[in-house]
Amino acid sequence: MSHFQCCGDTPYGEADEGVLCCNNILYHGMKDGQRCSPSGHIYWPSTELVCGSKVHYIGKHCCGENTYDPKTEICCNGHRHIRSGNMSCCGVTAYNTSSLQKKCCAGTLYDWQGRESQCCGNVLIEAGSNQTCCSASGLALVYNTQPGFTCCGFHYTNASLWSCCAGVLHPNLKPNTTKKNNDPGHKLLPLGDLTLEDLCYKNVSLGMVETVSVENNIRSIVMVNTMLKMASENRVQALHYPHYLTLPDHCGSPELVPGNTYIWVETPSMEISFISDLSNYSSPLHSILSMCGHLI
């Protein structure tokens, strides 16, 4: 007894020969070995490779709808580039990460004019510009600098009207007074804005936030999957136990989201000198070591 199933609006039997359902269309006269690609194209897996909507001969890898040779080329979001040196992708563009004249800001590549320039999302803010970057996990916004205004997460507000605690705004009940910190001490810095001296020549910690607790404006954080690294010495140590991190000024520190991965440096006095959110990096440790590779 033959079992029937549907291909779009067309019924067919499982035992029918020479038929293939692909993208809800029933094809007849098919040969054994022909398959349907995820994009809905019929091809021979033994001799063909489907990249998007195009069918190619096997032997290379997909880069968008075309193919590339990973031994000599690099693929950046579907665009092929010749591989040379310490090449990495910035959006669809490839660049040499050893170059001090280029800076990648969230997929947009800039000619880097000075070390004091910083990324704000995909915007590069030049040193001395009349712009302020306010950021929180996953979002960074650029504002025109105004006297009496300050950042609270990604908000830029009048400090006499609003106070800030860990990236959350609170209205001031009395004008020109503050009950909470209006000058947040730490910001979440993009990885590309960290100095190579801090990133490569200091003991840097990397880990994921498991839980957060606050008492008397002191924030206690449990970090798991923590690693300590000194890139300049090619040294990485995985901690087999949770790492406890304390921020003495909860309101003056950025929000740290459970489940997100961060990098930070603790001074000898156990103070935090910087924090960076690495949750958007598929391989944070590889990204860090790649930035330091040409200095080691």
Image (cartoon, rainbow, N blue to C red):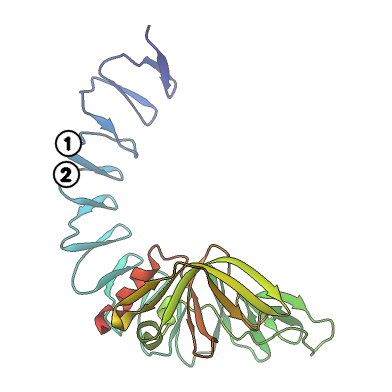
Q: Residue at x 40, y 12 (%)?
A: 3
Which residue in the protein does label 1 denote?
A: 46
Q: In the picture, residue 6 is in which quadrant?
A: top left
Q: Nearer the viewer, residue 23 or 174?
A: 174
Quadrant where the N terminus lies? top left
Q: Give the residue type that dot 1 points to.
A: Ser
Q: Is residue 288 visible?
A: no
Describe residue 203's horizontal placement relative to residue 252 as left or right: left
Pointers 1 and 2 in contact (C-beta within 8 Å): yes
Quadrant where the C terminus lies? bottom left
Secondary element at tag 1: loop
Which residue in the protein does label 2 denote?
A: 58
Residue 207 drawn at (x, y percent): 47, 70
* Number of other residues with Cα within 10 Å of mark 2, as a class: few under 14, some 14 to 19, many 20 or more: some
Q: Is residue 109 above or below residue 6?
A: below
Q: Is residue 215 visible?
A: yes
Residue at the far top in the pictured view: 1
